[in-house]
Image (cartoon, rainbow, N blue to C red):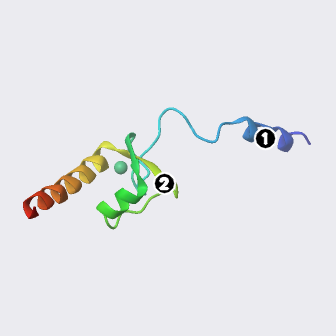
Amino acid sequence: MTAARNRRRMARLAPPKEKGSETCMVSGCKEDAARSISADKLKKTLSGVSLKTDSRRIHICKTHYRQFRKKTKGERELERLGW
Ligand SMILES: [Zn+2]
């Protein structure tokens, strides 16, 4: 059988990262990714969010990015008030 061999070869030739349309890496979300941010930041900012990947850099959709931005902005403003 050569089919298995061919498949293995294909996998080897295929680039590890998929280019083109990525989807949001927040689990349960199927929207197209619009932004890439650090997974660490997202987890810290949007607590309760779980991700589909373990990578440090993740892609998220507009909706999640907006949520993320809102929260970070809020924090920054609070900090400014404290100064
Ligand atoms: Zn999303």
Estimate how packed mark 1 is, as few (under 14), some (14 to 19) or many (20 or more) residues with alpha carbons within 10 Å: few
Q: Residue at x 21, y 57 (%)?
A: 71
77 or 33: nearer the eye? 77
Q: Where is residue 17? Give x, y as percent.
A: 59, 40
1 or 58: nearer the eye? 58
Q: Where is residue 54? Give x, y as percent.
A: 52, 58
* Label 2 secondary element: loop
* Label 1 secondary element: helix
Q: Residue furthest top?
A: 20
Q: Quadrant of the C terminus?
A: bottom left
Q: Quadrant of the N terminus?
A: top right
Residue where numbered disc 1 is placed = 7
Tell me if 12 is positioned left or right of 73 in this view. Answer: right
Q: Quadrant of residue 40?
A: bottom left
Foreground label between 2 and 1: 2
Q: Within 8 Å of ligand 1, the CB of disc 1?
A: no
The circle on residue 43 is: none
Tell me if 67 is positioned left or right of 40 in this view. Answer: left
Going by the numbered disc 1, the residue's amino acid type is: Arg
Q: Where is residue 39? Give x, y as percent.
A: 42, 55
Residue where numbered disc 2 is placed = 56
User: Compared with residue 18, is residue 45 higher up or lower down, i.e. above or below?
Assistant: below
Q: Where is residue 30? Give x, y as percent.
A: 41, 47
Cα distance in 3D space between marks 2 and 1:
29 Å
